[in-house]
Image (cartoon, rainbow, N blue to C red):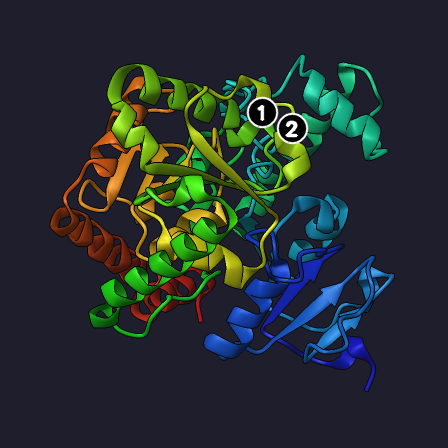
Amino acid sequence: MDLKDKEYDILVITADDHYEGLDAHGTVQVYKYLKNKLKANCALICTRSRMLHYIEDSYAIRDFGDLPKHKKIFVSDYLDLPFDVAKSLIEENDSKLYYCGMVHNMYTAGCAYPQEMNCDKYQYQEGCYNCKWVTTLNRRNNQPYGTGQGSVLSKWKVIEDFFGNNKYKKNIFYLGVSSFSVNQAKKSFLFKDIKTFLTPLVNTNPCVESTDLLLEYREQQNKMLLNNLEKQNEDFKKIDKICVWSAKDPRNERKGFDLFVDILYQLKNKYMTSKQLEKTLFVCMGDVEGYKQYLPALPQGIKVVLTGLLNEEQLNHVLSASSVYCCTTLEDAGPRTVGEAAANGCPTISYDTCVALDLVNDKSGKILECGDIDGYAKFVHKIIKMKKTAHDKMCLEAFKCYNEYYSDDNTIAKWKEAMEL
């Protein structure tokens, strides 16, 4: 049987998915969730990359005319489904199109992180005018809008002609993987009339099966990590608190490592005693090469360890052994590590610009206004000096938050409602 003679409820379309489901960008991960967890009748359509042979109902196509029969289409980047194709699918098949906000470029002229740019142009009808970032993006991706500032306006009008067109918008839906993403989409001009849903993306697993096992597990992981550190450096023998920060590449300004450096200075100069500094280790996960430019700027007298890039098991080991996870991202649909910290019962401090809004409360950590250095340092210090009983309660609450937000009851209900399953 030819592909276009087959019939599915949902087509998950991706041009390239380098993450193959291992990250919040992973369209493949969503496909697996729809097929395996929600038992949806769906197929994965790869339009530019190789067919993923190890995935059931995966197909590679060169022509959108070869798409099988369907009712709904899911994409995580509007570039994966050209607007002329999307229009035809709605006009000819009455297809329902679901755009999932893995990054925040759905409702801009291509800028993935307007909050980071301190830009609100996407909220107004004039759109993303006079934007050097989008101009560079158009040029780099060889998009058909030109290369000057006029290209931004041209692109905005093309996008508006689709998302803002009454002829199509009733068939368009936006799925946000965090409340932050959903709220930002609702503020945008392009999506002001688009129906939006919060659909949590489950991308990690709890460290233990039962809450009763959490504290014992964390204590074991903490002792194991500290013992390994002591073997490498005698200066670590007095360590009893671990504060962790993470990014694949700390040179990515959006992840806010420069803010974390400022927080370290505030801790040293204002909040922590010399004895507390001696007993606290700051662990920085991610590419060691990326940290090199920051090393001369780190405050003297603070103990810092660079782990390099870690695999999933190693990352979970560090998080389950740590006293607090510090997230300083300026904007994220995730980040994944916030969920991983909660899955390991690690209290989290974060700015109010990511999925932490869904996973962190005042009993499991702290949410602060983006850019607040002093408040951030103050709460890190509060956790560092916290008694074990109080800290244990915070760890249990973090684990509870994870299990509630990513529970099957919560996630399945939200995805089924959004995609009418």
Is residue 94 visible in the rendered image? The answer is: no
Q: Which is more toward the observer, 4 or 245?
A: 245
Q: Position of residue 195 (x, y in %)?
A: 44, 47
| Residue on which disc 2 sits | 292
| Residue at point 58%, 58% (across, down) | 311
| Residue on which disc 1 sits | 295
Is 134 placed left or right of 4 in the picture?
A: left
Question: As displayed, is residue 2 above or below residue 371?
Answer: below
Which quadrant, please, contains the C terminus? Answer: bottom left
Element type at mark 2: loop
Q: Which is more toward the observer, 70 or 239?
A: 239
Is 333 placed left or right of 48 in the picture?
A: left
Element type at mark 1: helix
| Residue at point 78%, 28% (across, down) | 138
Amino acid type indicated by mark 1: Leu
Amino acid type indicated by mark 2: Lys
